[in-house]
Image: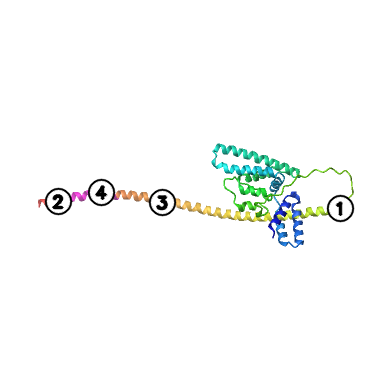
Amino acid sequence: MDERALLEMADDLYGRPLPEFTAARDRRAKELKADGSDDLAAAVKRLRKPSTAAWVVDLLVRRDRDQVDQVLSVGAALREAQAAMEAGELRALTRQRRQVTAALATQARSRAAEEGLRVTAAVADQVEATLTAGMVDELCGRALRSGLLVAALATTGVDPMAEADVAAALALPEALGFSATPREAPEPGRPDLRVVPDPDAAQKAVSSAQERVTEAEADRAEATEALAELDAERSRLEARTLQLQAELEELRRRTGDVEAECEEVEEEAAIVEEERDEAAARVRRADADLATAQEALERASARS
C-alpha cells in the first residue's frame, strides 16, 4: 500500500468541513475499491472522524500555518531555555505562553465560526490544551503540524509524552512528520438573485438526505462501538474495585488481629520482665548468703 497516497487522501479528507467527513471518506473508500485498490480502500475506511476540538485545531493549522509555526517555534525555544532560567523568569514565560495559546485558541474559534461551526466552552478548552501541548512537547508539536489530529492532546510538559500516546491521537501513525496542506478561506460569492428552477431538485434532495442518513448511521456505529468499549472498561473497573475493596477489608481484619496479638505479647513481656527482676534479686541475695557462708567456713577451718 502506498503510504504517501494514504496520507495525501487523509490530508484532503481532514481538510473538509466536519459534517462532510464521514460521507466523503466512505465515497473515497468505495471509489478505491472499485478501482481494485482494496488495501488502500480499507485503510481509508478505517480513518476515524475527528473530534470537534481536533478538527478545529486541524483547521487552524491549514488556515493559519505561518502563525502556528511561529508559536510552535517559540515553544521550542522556551523548552531549550527553561533549564537555565530562574523560577521568576519561568513564571513570567509560563504566563506569556498561556497568553499566546489563549490568543491562538480564540483565532481557532473564529476560523471555526467562519466554517459555520459554533465552538462550545468545553471544546475551546480542549483546543487550548492541544495548542499548549504543541508548545511544551516536541512530539505534540509535530502531531499538531500534521493537521491529522482526531483527538485533543493534553500534557503539562513536565514529562515528554510517549510516541504511542501521541500517535493514538492521529488519524495515522505515519502522520508524525507530515505537514498539512494550507487551505485558503472560502471566498464569499455574490448572491444570485435569479430564480432558476432545477428539474433535478427532488432527486438532489433525496440524494442529500440519503447522504445525511448514511453519515448519521456511520456516526452512530462509531459511537455505539465506543460506548461498548467504555461499558466493558467500566465493568472491568467496577470488578477491580470490588476486588480491591474485599482485599482492603481483609487487610483491615488482619490488622485488627495483629494489633490484638501485639497487645497480648506486650502484656506477657511486662509480666516476664517483672519475674526476671524478682529472679535477679534472688540471685543477688543468694550471692550474698554464699559469700557469708564461705567466710564462716574459712574462719571455722582456721580455728580447727
- The majority secondary structure of the magenta stretch comes to helix
* Element class at badge 1: helix
* Element class at badge 4: helix
Which amino acid type corresponds to the residue marked 4 in the rendered image?
Arg
Left or right: residue 180 compared with residue 238:
right
Which amino acid type corresponds to the residue marked 1 in the rendered image?
Ala
- Say whether marks 4 and 1 touch (CB < 8 Å): no
Which amino acid type corresponds to the residue marked 3 in the rendered image?
Glu
Residue 213 or residue 151, whichever sits in front: 151
User: Which numbered tag is attached to residue 264?
Assistant: 3
Disc 2: CA contacts within 10 A as few (<14), some (14-19) or many (>=20): few
N-terminal of the two: label 4 or label 1?
Answer: 1
Q: Is residue 217 magenta?
A: no
User: Which numbered tag is attached to residue 298?
Assistant: 2
Disc 1: CA contacts within 10 A as few (<14), some (14-19) or many (>=20): few
Which amino acid type corresponds to the residue marked 2 in the rendered image?
Glu
Q: Nearer the viewer, mark 2 or mark 1?
A: 1
User: Which numbered tag is attached to residue 202?
Assistant: 1
- Say whether marks 2 and 3 touch (CB < 8 Å): no
User: Which numbered tag is attached to residue 238?
Assistant: none
Residue matched to label 4? 284
